Amino acid sequence: MAMSESSRACAIWLTGLPASGKSTIAAALKPKLEGAGHVVEVLESDAVRRILTPAPTYSGEERDLFYRALAFLGGRLVAHGVTVVFDATANRRAYRDFARSLIPRFIEVAVVCPLDLCMKRDYKGTYQRGQRGETSTVPGLQDPYEAPVHPDVTIDTATLTAEEAAGRIFELVRKRSVSI
């Protein structure tokens, strides 16, 4: 008997430093999941933030609210059969733990990349703004980044391509979909 769409849906949280490769992996992962019959929504933090906090301050209170709202939104989508890929730093474990508490089929992906390589890849200029003192809240630079303690999978973007990373995550989703 085939699984219903809602029972196959899951949440995949790609967490890592800014410019570690989360968005590139999400872009490679989405078509793999869709090809396997998943309805997929990528919740990219910058895009969602433009709606929820159009003039972001990145204060602790604002981040708490933003990540609670992001987790809630993702949880509702999963409950309605949509597989959600969170493309969001979520620099505090508590943010990801809250999402896990809302979403039973939750996969945490640690996207690991050395800070110096992230800084070289930073096309948005996030680290440059932090180094110039224009912001004081860059995760990994001025604000702590709390890496997952027990991620479901660890992806090292210094050694893996986005396609290889997406393949590893996809295989984990496929394996978990069979066992759920």
Image (tube, rainbow, N blue to C red):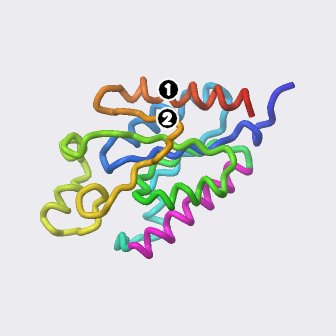
Which comes sooner in the sequence, label 1 or label 2?
2
Q: Which residues are magenta?
A: 60-79
Estimate the x, y position of residue 94 in percent, counting from the top left. Answer: 50, 61
Q: Residues within 10 Å of mark 2 (few under 14, many from 20)?
A: some
Residue beneath disc 1: 168
Quarter of the image where the C terminus is located:
top right
Estimate the x, y position of residue 14 in percent, counting from the top left. Answer: 47, 44
Residue beneath disc 2: 153
- For image coordinates 49% across by 35% down, the residue present is 153
Estimate the x, y position of residue 45 in percent, counting from the top left. Answer: 44, 56
Mark nearest the camera among 1 and 2 is 2
CB-based contact (under 8 Å), mark 1 and mark 2:
yes
Q: How far apart are labels 1 and 2 at the CA level? A: 8 Å
Residue 78: in magenta span: yes
**Residue lying farthest to the front in this orientation:** 149
**Residue lying farthest to the left in this orientation:** 132
What amino acid type is highlighted by mark number 2?
A: Val
Classified by dominant secondary structure, the portion drawn in magenta counts as helix
Name the one closer to the observer, 20 or 142: 142
Q: Is residue 13 left or right of residue 134?
A: right
Q: Is residue 177 left or right of residue 163?
A: right
* Residue 176 vertical placement versus 10 (above, below): above
